[in-house]
Image: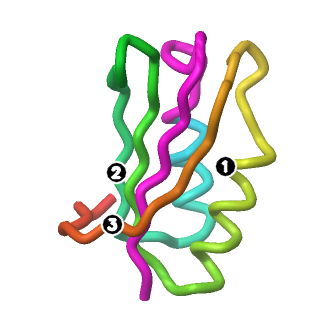
Amino acid sequence: MQKIKAKITGDRVHDVGYRVLLVNKALSLSVDNFNTFNTYLDGVQAVIVVIEAGDETIEEFKSFVVSVRPEKSMVDEVSFETYKNSVLNL
């Protein structure tokens, strides 16, 4: 099992359906421990995702996050890091 935190930042990542897109992908992968929320990092819109799952599922989710975006979003960067805290159940 792995726990990761993804940060998606850009000029328009809020109010474009990002969290719904990510929740639906997590559900399709049968992920139980998952959370996502909107925030600002240094004044820039950000979507934060934390997920706990098996290695294969994590890799598939990461690939999805990098390659699939809501139509109206404007993304500048996607980054991943190891996450140490608890991940809430979906």
Q: Residue furthest left?
A: 86
Amino acid at pointer 2: Asn
Residue 89 in picture, x, y percent from top left: 27, 64
Nearest to N terminus: mark 2 or mark 3: 2
Return the disc, 1 or 3, that comes first in the chain's sequence.
1
- Mark 1 crowd level (few <14, some 14–19, many ≥20, 10 Å Cα): many
Q: Residues within 10 Å of mark 2 (few under 14, many from 20)?
A: some
60 in the magenta segment: no
The residue beneath circle 1 is 65
Compared with 46, 4 (above or below) is below
- Residue 78 in picture, x, y percent from top left: 62, 42
Q: Which residue is mark 2?
A: 35
Pointer 3 local density, CA inside 10 Å: few below 14, some 14–19, many at least 20: some
Which residue has dot 3 on it? Answer: 83
Give above or below for 15 relative to 8.
above
Decide if residue 66 is on the left or right side of residue 85. Answer: right
Q: Position of residue 69 (x, y in %)?
A: 73, 33
Q: Which residues are magenta?
A: 1-19
